[in-house]
Amino acid sequence: MLYPGLTPLDLIGPLQVMCGLETVEAMFGVQPRHHVVVVAEQVDDVPTDTPVRIAAPTLLDEVPEPDVVVVPGGGAPTLRQLTNPALLDYLRQVDRSAEVVASVCTGSLLLAGAGLLQGRRATTHWAYHRFLDRLGATYVPQRWVEDGRYLTGAGVSAGIDAALRLAARLTSDDLARAVQLGIEYDPHPPHGGIDWSGVDRDMLAERVQAVAEQALGADPTMLARLLG
Amino acid sequence: MLYPGLTPLDLIGPLQVMCGLETVEAMFGVQPRHHVVVVAEQVDDVPTDTPVRIAAPTLLDEVPEPDVVVVPGGGAPTLRQLTNPALLDYLRQVDRSAEVVASVCTGSLLLAGAGLLQGRRATTHWAYHRFLDRLGATYVPQRWVEDGRYLTGAGVSAGIDAALRLAARLTSDDLARAVQLGIEYDPHPPHGGIDWSGVDRDMLAERVQAVAEQALGADPTMLARLLG
């Protein structure tokens, strides 16, 4: 799914993986179990946190019972969705039938805001970890976290890893590996991985508080809940 | 830049990195040297090789002399751009002033088709490596390849790594690392990296030939050039 203002890599990473799964299923003559759709409240293009706009071709109402849902994240616009009953109601509705409920980055705050992660282990963008806890989940600092039907990915780029895990879960390790080869996902960050021993996950606390205040000024109750 | 039918991760990976660079420059009080724009032949949204459509806000003509250009790739629709004089002319034009000319995946075939990679070391999606050679470049099987002003990335997801390298080149290693932390790029593919010893880069030769025939049926000269 998508919504206005999201971080597009949160959406496009998993989307490219899941569309790759359709491609390799066709190549290998495997009967496809799933079909990828992208849903939104509107089919017009919406802004993102980059210069491009993105349009989903399908409305939320057209896919009331998906087998899998993936919720992308973002900054203030994502927190603003915590006060959007249409989106939260949709998440509660699909949760009743979905085999896997997934998120990338702060998308997990929307799952938690919909009440789906109560008491569950989950992850989110490192800078937003306290918001996840305050919405009733337990933050786990991993690339992705699986707790039953819930698969949550860490910040932004983690959606690629989480989606490859999702592809394996829905099909097989072999097909997931073929998707990985198709998108040539053999990562080599020029400066190596992140050295977490040098990262204080609260170092942006003031900044994310300002993001929350910007997003939720009109909803003091939700704002107080996030700020603890 | 974008064009109809592209692989969106080729665009969005580098775009998220370069927009992240703007963010960390602002956080660190660094005078920004660059501003990110996304250009296309049209400002209407265009299809991608996934269900979403993407719209660039800016026309090619509005940015005649960018400091950096990044060209994304894709399948048949990308090869079709090899016969689009407007796009190839734009690439030749920006090449005259650009400090860095970059590509992701088969985007390098467009740089080569515009005549910019003659005799240069470059990379592309592994399955398309012979097309790159036949367009006058020398394929190098690396995550990204730098030859003078030309920075080419391997398939699809490699755009993230190549863009972090670009960010470091334009600013500093420290700022590139801050961008990496911002997009939480600490990759952990669930099945590890790609084991290239088990990959025959010609194993999809028939498939990519069919892609070329589909794309370039109307231009037998270009088709013959690609198929060698």
Image (spheres, coloured by chain):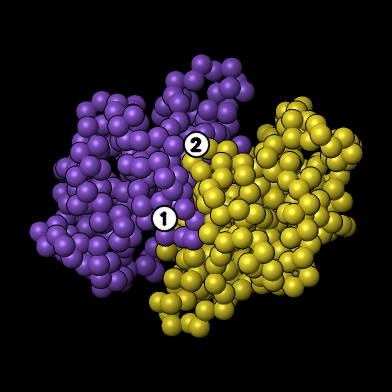
Chain colours: A yellow, B purple
Left or right of residue A218: residue A26: left
Category of crowding for the residue at label 1, using alpha-carbon neighbours closer than 10 angstroms: few (below 14), some (14–19), many (at least 20): some
Count of marks overlaid on the render = 2
Mark 1 vs mark 2, CA separation in Å:
17 Å
Left or right of residue B76: residue A213: right
Residue topped by disc 2: A51
Residue A31 visible in this rendered orientation of the protein: yes
Q: Where is residue B216 in the image (x, y as percent from the top left)?
A: 20, 62
**Mark 2 and mark 1 in contact (Cβ < 8 Å)?**
no
Q: Quadrant of the N terminus of chain B?
A: top left
Q: Where is residue B159 in the image (x, y as percent from the top left)?
A: 43, 46
Residue at (26% x, 25% y) in the render: B97
Quadrant in the rendering for residue B194: bottom left
Report helix, strand or loop for mark 1: strand
Q: In which quarter of the image is the C terminus of chain B?
A: bottom left
The amino acid marked with disc number 2 is Pro
**Numbered tag placed on residue B47 in the rendering:** 1
Report helix, strand or loop for mark 2: loop
Nearer the observer, A132 or B218: B218
Nearer the observer, A27 or B181: A27
**Chain letter for mark 1:** B
Category of crowding for the residue at label 2, using alpha-carbon neighbours closer than 10 angstroms: few (below 14), some (14–19), many (at least 20): some
The amino acid marked with disc number 1 is Pro
